[in-house]
Amino acid sequence: AIQMTQSPSSLSASLGGRVTITCRASQGISLDLSWYQQKPGKAPKLLIYAASTLQSGVPSRFSGSGADTDFTLTISSLQPEDLATYYCLQDFNFPRTFGQGTKVEIK
Amino acid sequence: QVQLVESGGGAIQPGRSLRLSCVVSGFNFNNYAIHWVRQAPGKGLEWVTLMSSDGSKKYYADSVKGRFTISRDNSKNTLYLQMNSLRPEDTAVYYCARDHGASGWGGYLDYWGQGTLVTVSP
């Protein structure tokens, strides 16, 4: 199975600050990576698919980049409603595998 | 609007069986693959299984292979997860989620249900 290594496991940033989360795949997965946001007590929500395509309705402060084995989720200007845990998921093959998650807190 | 609603969770003893259901609405169920994803208390997301839109393809995580079976009834807009030989480590919230495509290959999970909690304990 493809291993997805996500870092950091948690971070604290100021409102308006820039946040970067990385995800590394144990083998090449082309652009087959998606990012999800999970707020406390809620179901996950799709943010980005195909590594860099923003899901409809998601604020433009979220962006994704990368290809092959290295991927990044960036929040350009952190807002209070961005308090959540973020996960990457490889969509390349089965079994699908998630990263371990990154908990984002407001400093 | 697209909705997925899980049910069937509850408390159950190790070794017993349980069947979860996921009823969908707001889209043509026949055209989409559907996943189950679970989350143990305080832990991350774990992908469990997927069934293609026509039921011809099924994929499982190693942790549930041979114990869990995914199925669907397209006439009832319903996906099922039959869970046998349950273990304490199967304790989790179970989510169903729609794949963007029919086969599940290269697709992402674009809509999720709210989840149903399964607790496996003596």
Image (tube, coloured by chain):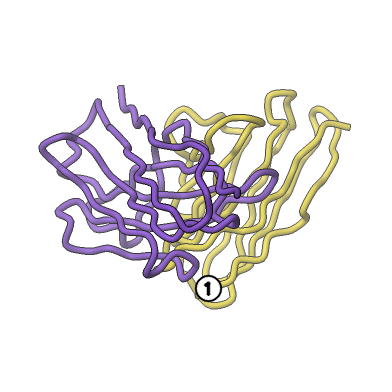
Chain colours: A yellow, B purple
Vertically, is A47 above or below B48?
above
Looking at the image, which residue is at 77% across and 53% down?
Answer: A9
Query: Can you give x and y, in whole percent of width and height, for residue B72 in the image?
Result: 21, 47
Q: Residue furthest left?
A: B75
Chain under disc 1: A
Q: Nearer the viewer, residue A15 or B93?
A: B93
Vertically, is A51 above or below A47?
below
Q: Nearer the viewer, residue B92 or A102?
A: B92
Query: Can you give x and y, in whole percent of width and height, for residue B10 in the image?
Result: 49, 36
The residue that label 1 is drawn on is: A2
Query: Can you give x and y, in whole percent of width and height, for residue B62 in the image?
Result: 46, 71
Vertically, is A4 above or below B81?
below
Quadrant of residue B51 in the image?
Answer: bottom left
Query: Can you give x and y, in whole percent of width and height, for residue A90 in the image?
Result: 49, 61
Looking at the image, which residue is at 19% across and 51% down?
Answer: B53
Q: Nearer the viewer, residue B61 or A7?
A: B61
Quadrant of residue B107 in the image?
Answer: bottom left
Q: Nearer the viewer, residue A85 or A55?
A: A85
Looking at the image, which residue is at 66% across and 31% down?
Answer: A40
Quadrant of residue B8 in the image?
Answer: top left
Neighbor class of circle 1 (other Cα within 10 Å; few <14, some 14-19, many 20+) is some
Which quarter of the figure is the N terminus of chain B placed in? top left
- Apparent side of residue B28 relative to residue A99 in the rendered image (left or right): left
- Apparent side of residue A14 relative to residue A49 in the rendered image (left or right): right
Q: Does dot 1 land on a helix, a strand or a loop?
A: loop
- Type of amino acid under label 1: Ile
Vertically, is B95 above or below A58?
below
